[in-house]
Image (spheres, rainbow, N blue to C red):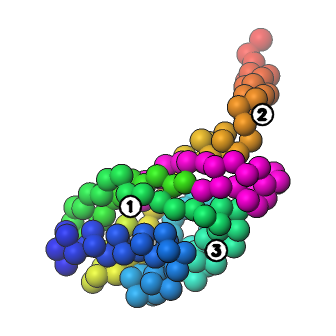
Amino acid sequence: MSLEENKSIVRRYWEGFNAHDLTVWDDLCSNLFSNHDPGMSLAVQNLHDTKKHVFTALLDVFPDINSTEEEILADGDKVVTRRTFTGTQQGEFMGMAATGRTVQFTGIFIDRLVSGKIEEQWVQYDAMGLLHQVKGDYLVLAEAQAARAACEAAYRYD
């Protein structure tokens, strides 16, 4: 596959995400698909579980979530996409009740394609920025200060 064809496949993957119709992923992803997402447990890395996780976790919390492509690069069998996500928190998130706040966060995704199918995906996203927006400045600051104090206490060399 050419670099442009690989980028087109990844773009179609994200079009399915934005349409909240992940059935297109069945055609675009390999049966050996593996998701390397630090926010997901090791047991939830195949395509079926990834789709289930996206629908039950992300879309339940942010039912209007949408993403915008900021940049897409291809080299060899990999496509790197930088995206901005926007959504309104309308469900419980990390134990916090719905706030109705609109949030925006970024993510970088590296997809490895084999024979025109996405076989692996590595995910990095601004989880702290997302948490910061959901919780509000004062709560994140208080938690950061408490974490710093705990680290200083634990690693004090008197």
Determine which quarter of the picture holds residue 83: bottom left
Three-letter amino acid code of the residue under disc 3: Phe
Horizontal side of 48 relative to 99 (left or right) equals left
Residue 48 x %, y %: 58, 83
The residue that appears at 77% across and 33% down in the rendered structure is 139
- Does residue 54 show up? yes
79 in relation to 144, above or below: below
CA distance for labels 1 and 2: 32 Å
Say whether disc 2 or disc 3 marks the residue closer to the N-terminus: 3
Residue under pointer 3: 55
Residue 50 x %, y %: 58, 74
4 in relation to 115, above or below: above
Residue under pointer 2: 139
CA distance for labels 3 and 1: 21 Å
Residue 63 x %, y %: 65, 66
User: Is the residue under label 3 in contact with that under label 2 (CB below 8 Å)?
Assistant: no
- Tell me the SS state at disc 3: helix
- Does residue 44 show up? no
Q: Quadrant of the N terminus?
A: bottom left
Are there few (<14), some (14-19), or many (20+) residues within 10 Å of tag 2?
Answer: few
User: Is the residue under label 1 in contact with that under label 3 (CB below 8 Å)?
Assistant: no
Three-letter amino acid code of the residue under disc 1: Ile
Check residue 109 for magenta coloring: yes
Three-letter amino acid code of the residue under disc 2: Leu
Which mark, residue 134? none
State the extent of the magenta-drawn residues as a range.
87-110
Residue under pointer 1: 110
Say whether disc 3 or disc 1 marks the residue closer to the N-terminus: 3
Residue 10 x %, y %: 35, 71
The residue that appears at 75% across and 25% down in the rendered structure is 145
